[in-house]
C-alpha cells in the first residue's frame, strides 16, 4: 500500500461525544413544535413528548437542570466499497451516502435518539452536533 493510504487492518472509524444528561428529578416534559419537532422528524422520524432542563433545577442537580453525562457515537464500517472510495479520494458526501446505504447511523441521529428516550435535550444535541 502506498504511504498515507491507511492500513489494511483498519476495520472501522468511531466518533463519539459526551452530552449532559437532563436531571430525572426536575426535568420538564413538553411537546415540541416548529423547528424542534422538525428536527426530531428529520433525524429519526419521531414526534412526541420530550424533556428540557428545569430553568431552576433542584438540589439533586445543584440547580443546573443536568446531572451526569451520556455518550453518543457513530461507527463507520470500512467495507471494501468505503475503503475503495477513500483511496480514490471521492468527495465526503459520496462516502457518507454510501455509508448510510450500508446502515450507518450518524452522530446527530444517535443524539436525537437520546432526546427521544429522555436522557438529554435538543439544546444539548445542538451544542455537540451540527447539521450539514
Image: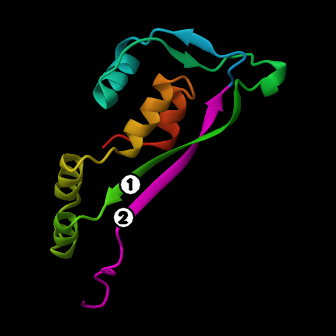
Q: Which residues are magenta?
A: 1-22
Determine which of the numbered discs, if any, sits on residue 125 in the image: none
Q: Secondary structure at mark 1?
A: strand
Q: Residue at x 46, y 36 (%)?
A: 111
Q: Secondary structure at mark 2?
A: strand
Q: Please, is residue 6 above or below residue 53 in the view?
A: below
- Farthest bottom residue in view: 2
Determine which of the numbered discs, if any, sits on residue 12 in the image: 2
Q: Give yes or no for residue 10 being in the magenta stretch.
A: yes
Q: Residue at x 63, y 20 (%)?
A: 53
Are the residues at dot 2 and dot 1 in contact (C-beta closer than 8 Å)? yes
Say which of 105 and 88 sits in front: 105
Q: Quadrant of the rendered structure where residue 5 is?
A: bottom left
Q: Residue 46 at what x, y percent from top left? A: 34, 20
Determine which of the numbered discs, if any, sits on residue 75 in the image: 1
Say which of 68 and 91 sits in front: 68
Amino acid at each position: 500500500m502506498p504511504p498515507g493510504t491507511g492500513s489494511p487492518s483498519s476495520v472501522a472509524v468511531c466518533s463519539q461525544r459526551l452530552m449532559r444528561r437532563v436531571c430525572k428529578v426536575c426535568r420538564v416534559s413538553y411537546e415540541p413544535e416548529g423547528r424542534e419537532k422538525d428536527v426530531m422528524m428529520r433525524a429519526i422520524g419521531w414526534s412526541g413528548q420530550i424533556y428540557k432542563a428545569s430553568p431552576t433545577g433542584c438540589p439533586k442537580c445543584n440547580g443546573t437542570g443536568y446531572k451526569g453525562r451520556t455518550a453518543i457515537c457513530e461507527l463507520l464500517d470500512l467495507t471494501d466499497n468505503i475503503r475503495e472510495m477513500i483511496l480514490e479520494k471521492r468527495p465526503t458526501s459520496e462516502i457518507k451516502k454510501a455509508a448510510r446505504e450500508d446502515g450507518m447511523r450518524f452522530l446527530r441521529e444517535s443524539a436525537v435518539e437520546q432526546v427521544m428516550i429522555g436522557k438529554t435535550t435538543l439544546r444539548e444535541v445542538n451544542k455537540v452536533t451540527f447539521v450539514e
